[in-house]
Image (cartoon, rainbow, N blue to C red):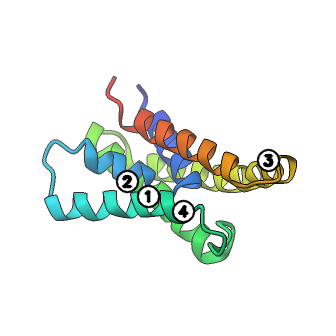
Amino acid sequence: MNILLHAAFAGAATGSRSQSALAAYELTDPHPRTFRRAATVLGAAGELVGDKLPRVPSRLQPAALGARLVCGGLSGWLLAGRHGGARIPATLVGCGAAAATSFAGARTRGLLATRLGNDLPGALAEDAIAVSLAGLAVRRG
């Protein structure tokens, strides 16, 4: 699979759950660093839980959006390095995909919450999409 497609999947995942692609990368690292892996996976798990809390700020606030863009770009950079691809284009694709899904995900989830009267179904669907995209990003072949 083309490295830019991997980077796009990773970035799209981070637009929904900022730590998802980094956690997938760590979980598939053939030479894991135990502390880094544990910290990243725990961060991703905490985000899956914390995202459902009513007091969590919008992902579109500058700090939250910036973190998603950085995670998307970093995921593209790391995946390109793992697969011997060009890092700068993969970084830009990851960052762009993170931006796109940050806005699209917030809008879609808001519409679903209004329509269903509850945010939880949209949040759980978004979890599933983010985990699936992160899995595709690190998939070989």
CB under 8 Å between callouts 3 and 2? no
CB under 8 Å between callouts 3 and 4? no
Foreground pick, 76 / 47: 47
Three-letter amino acid code of the residue under disc 1: Gln
Q: Secondary structure at mark 3?
A: helix
**Residue designated by label 2:** 22
Three-letter amino acid code of the residue under disc 4: Arg
- C-alpha span from label 3 to label 2: 27 Å
Q: Residues within 10 Å of mark 4 (few under 14, many from 20)?
A: many
Q: Position of residue 92 (x, y in %)?
A: 52, 52
Q: Residues within 10 Å of mark 2 (few under 14, many from 20)?
A: many
Q: Secondary structure at mark 4?
A: helix
- C-alpha span from label 3 to label 4: 22 Å
CB under 8 Å between callouts 2 and 1? yes
- C-alpha span from label 4 to label 2: 11 Å
Foreground pick, 109 / 102: 109
Which numbered tag is attached to residue 68? Answer: 4
Q: Residues within 10 Å of mark 1 (few under 14, many from 20)?
A: many
**Residue designated by label 1:** 19
Q: Position of residue 111 (x, y in %)?
A: 83, 50
Q: Secondary structure at mark 1?
A: loop
Q: Earlier in the sequence, mark 4 or mark 2?
A: 2
- C-alpha span from label 2 to label 1: 5 Å
**Residue designated by label 3:** 112
Q: Nearer the viewer, mark 3 or mark 2?
A: 3
- C-alpha span from label 1 to label 4: 8 Å
Three-letter amino acid code of the residue under disc 2: Leu
Quadrant placement of the N terminus: top left
Query: Can you name the residue that lies furthest to the front here?
Result: 117
For image coordinates 29% across by 37% down, the residue present is 83
For image coordinates 35% across by 52% down, the residue present is 23
CB under 8 Å between callouts 4 and 2? no
